[in-house]
Image (cartoon, grey):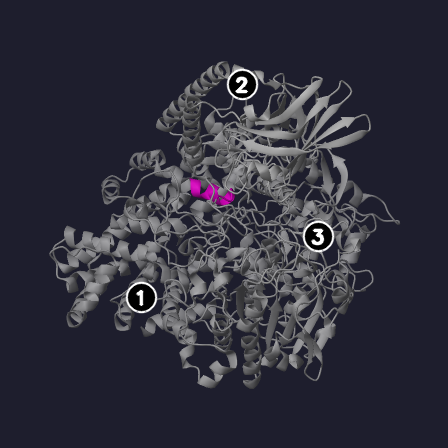
Amino acid sequence: MNLLQDLTRRHFFQTTGLGFGAVALQSLMARDSRADQPLIVKEPMLAPRAKRVIYLHMAGSPSQLELFEDKPELQKLHMQDAPQSFLEGKRFAFIKGVPKVLAGQFPFHRFGESGQTMSELLPTLGKVADKLCVIRTVHTEQFNHAPAQLFIHTGTPRLGSPSLGSWATYGLGSVNENLPGFVVLLSGGKTPDAGKSLWGSGFLPSVYQGVNCRTTGDPVLYLSDPAGMGRPLRRKMLDTLAEMNAAENRRSGDPETLSRISQYELAYRMQTAVPDVMDISKEPQHIHDLYGSKAGFISPAESADDPRVLYKGDDPTFANNCLLARRLIENGVRFVQLYDWGWDHHGSSLGESIDETLPIKCQQTERAIAGLITDLDQRGMLDDTLIIWGGEFGRTPMMQNNVRSELKKGYIGRDHHPHAYTMWLAGGGIKGGLSYGKTDDFGYYPVENPVSIRDLQATILHVLGLDPHRFSYAYQGLDNRLIGPTDEGRVLTDILA
Amino acid sequence: MKLLSIMVISLLSATSVFAAEEPVSFSRDVLPILSANCFACHGPDEHERQADLRLDLEADAKKLRDGSPAVTPGSPDKSSMIERLFSTDPDTVMPPPKSKRQLTPAQIETVRKWVAQGATWERHWSFEPITKPAGSLDDLVRAPLAAKKLSLQPPASPETLVRRLSLDLIGLPPTLDQAEAFARDPSPAAYEKLVDELLARPQFGEHWGRMWLDLARYADTKGYEKDLGRTMWPWRDWVVNSLNDDMPLTQFTIEQLAGDLLPNPSEAQLIATAFHRNTLSNDEGGTDDEEFRTVAVKDRIDTTMQVWMGLTMGCAKCHTHKYDPISNDEYYKFYAVFNQTEDADRYDDAPRLAILTPSQRAEQERLQVAVKMRDEAVKQAAASDAEKTTVEEMKWKRPTDITAMAKSGANLVTLEDGSILAKGKLDNEDTYTVTLMLPAGKHTALRLEAIPTKLPDGQLGVGRKAADPNFVVSELTVEVVQGETAQPVKLANARADFAQDGWPVTAAIDGDLKTGWAVSPRQRDPHVALFDFAEPLNFTAESKLRVTLTQNYGDKLVLAQFRLTASDADPATLSPRAESPQTQQTRNELTAAQKSLNDFNAALPQLPVLRELPAGKQRVTKIHKRGNFLDLGHEVTADIPSAFGKLPEGTSPNRLSVAQWLVNNDNPLTPRVWANRVWARLFGQGIVETEEDFGALGSPPSHPQLLDWLAAEYRDGGWSLKKLLKAIVMSDTYRQASATTPALREADPRNILLSRGARFRLSAEVVRDQSLAVSGLLSLKQGGPSVMPPQPSGLWRSTYNGTKWIDAEGEDRYRRGIYTYLKRTTPYPSFMTFDAGSGEVCQVRRIRTNTPLQALVTLNDPVYLEAAAALAKRMVTDAKDTSGRAARGLRLALVRPIRDEEVTPLVRLQQETEKSFGSVPDEAAALIKTTRADPGAMLATEFAAWIVTASVILNLDEFLTRN
């Protein structure tokens, strides 16, 4: 085995991989599809403010008018016909005719020294309000779920482009080769609307696609050895395989064979490293208390045809994922993407209302998120971990009216609203306790500091030390970038610490 | 950094095989530099153009401006472009610092040398016509090799060659018989015979079809949020069959792009058009169908240009292309060609083509005849009813001078029998207002007849909505109109032959719009309702009756055909006539027969196809400003981009002429792009490495002459893929041994020069198919609906989509990879791990990766475990002793003869494993159970050890690689 390891190591050092210093030549290198160490750690292009990302995406899109945007004017117009200015020239997903204005359904409070305005539905998150930079003026170009999710995660509302996590691992590599560099965790019982392409590598090599680590079954697909094969046997089998592959390398002289040997070794180490990091039962009770997590819990909602009707406030699935996210980044994973489904509160059928479902979804998530921030802070990791929270668009100041136009308990809802909504960032390089941007009295449009999806993407890349305007990959005759072909996206320097 | 720059230099030198002393070529050496650094501001895009200077046009570059032209042939010192490239002043240097582009000193020197050498202009190399170079394929490879003092390697061993050929041509390993026969007689004639045999195998189309499915973005679902299933497999089978028939590319192109526009298209030609129906449909609630229709049309354009021409048209959606000659206007002219098909992102994916087997066709005819017979019977029964009921009918008077209006704007047509038929617009709700004249005198009652009429689905119904032809008369009111005044008529009583539970006819006169008269489940039968006037009406010649039928339920439950009549008889003597029991019976039989036919048709696979809109209904195409379909600019007419020749004489611009233009012999791009693509599948990389980009920014060809030789061979050989493949695999270049040495690797690190045979990891499907083949599990069943081999449970969790992945049993568990069901939002995971795509966008090439996740697949995916067990079974059955069995397994997998020492590690593994299983026999049994193996008479511990041993074989690098 010594000879083998030596060979592999030598091969490793001979391989330059996708280097990152010479950016002018980067597109040329990107075409080098044989780069044998695609996930090797690469130097950022700029001084990074954060080294890793946890992105909490609330699929379906939570209502900013219940969670962050306190709009007394809506109370005044409550259940009156929406003014024409709300409707003229607008396309809605479901609203028909003239809908009624809907007041915020829950009281707001001011939290922290910074006095952030947040809903009473977010009491625990409120305690870390001074860590959050709440952006109240995000606007998008899409008002249907799948295209809007694709837009925010891949920079285009169409399919075929790499996701943010793929870009990040392509640009920066990953620290721990025994774990995937880009991990995806799901909750809420369904995959997000646009499916796997949200964590796909698009035109980048498939090695940069997100790996969905599951909390039931194999955490990584095909990770477990078959029944009857213990670790010593697997080791012995892989030793035989390596010995024979080394012989093949002597015959063929192809360095790719050495690379294959090291991939099998990585797989072997991954088989213990992944279950190890995924095992939250190792966490002490006070940590579980912090997140509201519960080791080994399997929610019936996760396998239901319609999970929404099974949602319970104390379901710890999302909390478990938050705790897992911390364990993953602690172990060197570059990008952890959480998707929680079930935030599409139209009020048109059971289990999707602002008045009943939204509070449940908040209970499932807000304590866990606050716990994650606190935990990272206590470990000194918040300073170089970027946390992103938000949906793919916002919700209308009007009540959705295509099914019913009167208020009915459990059926109060809002339609999709792309013109202004709230997201927040926290951690590495971000100013905490900041409320950024302002919307009009109805929360309909930004009136101060509008933030486009491209601005947000540019800022995230910048925080990671990747110049959003120069960071690109040549494909189909274009230097493709996350922020798209135009230079509209700008780094939000106001929110950087 | 040092290390990095060394690599970059070696890469640069590797991408071109030309010696440095050669004269500078504009298209090869200079144009790529100008394209990448200058054209963004000095190129085709008029909006971005600076200083009114175009460097993509010779005349413009050489035009005198401010005293000196940008380029003065032969005089770099009199060329302002050269001066500014060399400038150190940030205000004058080009490209300007803010562009963040910078030329290397070597690039500047190249441009300078080109100007010094006379600045000859050429078009971009790939747009130039093809001339077939003299000499053979091998000559064109040997010459550049010789320039580097290299030569072709001797041929690979016969067994290696057989395996290589078989994997390359049919995607499956050869049988040992084939390998042994060829080893006995490795003559050129025997080799050629082998090539011909493989090309004739039906598995050929499955293997090469997979390449086309990637390009065509084939999948078994519609994509986006719900990602429901759709029937695309008949088109996939068409592709496989066409390739097996060696359909010329010309025909392959024309039928797929425009089969429906051919004269009297055959069923197969219509099936072919499903190629462009592989585009996604968005069923998400609240989406604008027109938005996603335009997205699909744009995808068709981008895919068409990409697949045939190797060009990216996408940029020109928003602005004129910065590097290639495609303007914004031209994009939408081309769009206009594809903008005339009927499909419109509908939920049912219409228009579709039912796909029938011969026996299904016979069954369909039988059912159609049955319906026709029952239909006749009903007509006869109704006629005989009419005779019998003449007396009753005598009591009813038909009105005259009927005018009927629908609030929705639907067209209410009065027919000869006095009935009123609703046509045209169909809203959720409607109110019909009928004004009519009655004979002068007394009238006591009004009768409303709901008459079954033929709906779009061919079935009868009394309401207009085919899926549920019920109606709800929320309210019926009657007024007597005299001049300007209208007097309401009070209705005393209402009776009907039938009413739906909870929807009595009296509810139609109760003044409540939320209630009404409805007739489910008998919404396909005639119905009658009588409304008695509270006081008899005395009609004069001046008065008219106005009847208002308010149908407010919503959901399109409105009357399709109805008749109003009045009576002067005593209401007590009137009855709402039902049909005779016999008629009722016959009608029930008709309904049943019609339902059988409809159920039969509904269960047929329905393939989405292209269908051109009729002349009067063609869409007007306008530019989408910045690509936004809601922000329309000026109108454009259909055409192709002007830089790429003309449409065939005498044709008008439509899909058919565009298809003909793509495969016209004068189009240099299509044959180059296709020949390069085929080459890349055989050699692991293209002659143009950027298979997806033959435009200005693509990588230049490593062997331009070889590429043209292949392109000409393909085009002039009748566009035959099989002939092209044969020409390549017969060459010495193809047959070289793939073994390499450090010296060879140093001279030609990435084998760009073809200094040795290609060696690369097999594709996702071939990795799987090969394991199944050598283990004996593979099913060669061809065609039909896609299948679901085992995949981990719980992966399919799409929103609002209840469909499930159910692991196949029996033969379908082991079909070839091309038949595995592909759900776009959750593709089959092990293929994704091996670089396959999701079928959501045109995938030009799969960039090969080598990852630990791939190792996990071939170690632990049940498919590979079951294959290992089946291979183990073959090993222990075919040979008697341990080393014989190990050797047998290796031979089956690797095909080549096995040396004794190669068996040693496997023998050791088997023996040690058997021994260790001895102390834990339960584990041996568990492994056998998981792998679905049958140890037969062999001890479980021994057999389980063979499974482990076979699994090693299926994971060998040599096995996963084609060499």
Viewer-proximal residue among A98 and B10:
A98
Residues behind callouts 2 and 1 on a single chain = no
Q: Is residue B580 magenta?
A: no
Q: Is residue B214 magenta?
A: yes
**Residue B917's x, y, as percent?**
18, 69
Chain ID, mark 2: B
The label shown at residue B392 is 2
For disc 3, the neighbor class at 10 Å (few under 14, some 14 to 19, many from 20) is many
**Residue B866's x, y, as percent?**
27, 55
Q: Which residue is mark 3?
A: B111
Q: Is residue B744 above or below residue A427?
A: above
Q: Secondary structure at mark 3?
A: helix
Task: Give the magenta range.
Answer: B209-218
Q: Amino acid at mark 2?
A: Glu
Distance, label 1 to label 3, CA atoms, is 59 Å
Distance, label 3 to label 2, CA atoms, is 101 Å
How many numbered callouts? 3
- Quadrant for the N terminus of chain B in the image: bottom right
**Residue B122's x, y, as percent?**
68, 41
Chain ID, mark 1: A
Q: Is residue A214 above or below residue A373?
A: above
